[in-house]
Image (tube, rainbow, N blue to C red):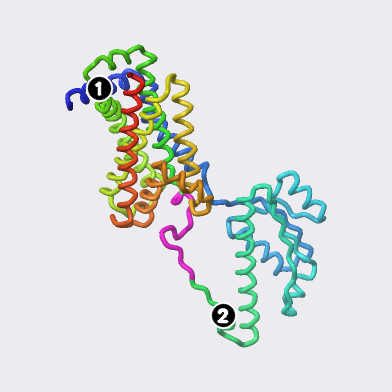
Amino acid sequence: MFNRISTIAGKEFLHIRRDPRLIAAILIMPLLQLVLFAYALSFDIRNINTVVINRDQSPISRKFVSAFTRSGYFTIVANLNLDSDIDKALDTNKARVAISIPPDFARELDKGGRPKVQILIDGSEPNTAIVARGYTTAITQAFSNNILIDNLNRRGLSNGSRSLPINISSRVWYNPKLEGIVFILPGLIVVIMANLAVIQTALALVREKDHGTIEQLIVSPLHPIELMLGKVFPFLVITLFDVLLITLVGILGFHVPFRGSFTYFAIGGGLFTLATLSLGLLISAVSSTMESANQLATFASMLPAFLLSGFIWPLENMPAALQFISYLFPFRYFVAIVRNLFLKGTNLSVLLPNFLALLIFSLVTLGLSALSFKERVD
């Protein structure tokens, strides 16, 4: 049995070595995708174009505007004079945020009042609008607290901070700086490897049909499961190498922390690679042409990896039906594994259910692939 599997695996390695485009797709494309996705898919929103109407022009109002620019989240692109200019700036996408300061801003603050500052936010991009609204609220609150403390200090209350009703001490675990790349990159490993493994393996058996060599495999003494294992093994080795490569690039190039066990990561990576390769083989076994295999593989890998894995959107926020469907794909399990290992460094008891799910998925899918191929042969 082992000799027959190694023969098929050796034949697959030979095909890969003779196809430079396939080698480039397997070894170079994952790195290019990692770099492009890591920079393109970012939740860190900075330098939001902002326009200002400052009708007060007092030192304190200018200091208030400066608080926005110093934060790094807002870039003042224009100082306007008329309300109609705000409409034009937002309509033409010149700005995403507009700040309007009333003429009595400083006078109201001196009297202990609460001047009303109007902040208009472009909601055509909901993610940017939500983040911008949170930034403006936080900056305004911090500025207001500083003014309150200064006023109390001027009245002889040396420790004015005690007069604040609530003193919040917050700390963010696992990602203290709330960097988007730390959240995105572990999930990117899953998406890129799913795309590579499923699509490349989905063409394995269909390629034999196109080349006219499928009849030789049919009449050979190979058992279908031996054929499946022989087809999977070369891509298993190459995909594991890719997993290691892009992981090192993420850790060393993008400075994403890795707090877990590399042994557990290797186990999870091996099981996930086997699961995705088995899914690709199942698609290849039920497909009759290269085009149908490629389309089905893209649909079965990219969409679930992006939408049903928890890569970007929390699974808990999805409808119950979609949450159930996500259990049928291996992507959600490996996203949980890599996020826990990279960011939290969790132990085996947390990872074990995901390991078992990937192993069961691999065995079931590999068996279905062999059964499907046998039925088509019969």
Q: For the residue carrying disc 1, how many other residues have a C-alpha within 10 Å: few (<14), some (14-19), or many (20+)?
A: many
What residue type is disc 1 on?
Ile
Q: Nearer the viewer, residue 302 or 342?
A: 302
Q: Residue furthest bottom?
A: 156
Q: Horizontally, is 98 left or right of 24 in the view? A: right
Q: In x, y percent, where is residue 17?
A: 30, 21
Quarter of the view holding residue 9: top left
Task: Name the secondary structure under disc 2.
Answer: helix
Image quadrant holding the C terminus, namely: top left
Q: In x, y percent, where is residue 34?
A: 43, 39
Q: Earlier in the sequence, mark 2 or mark 1?
A: 1
What residue type is disc 2 on?
Ser
Q: Nearer the viewer, residue 339 or 69?
A: 339
Task: Say which residue label 1 marks.
Answer: 8
Task: Name the secondary structure under disc 1.
Answer: helix
Q: Main secondary structure of the magenta part?
A: loop
The disc placed on residue 161 is 2
Q: In x, y percent, where is residue 58?
A: 74, 68
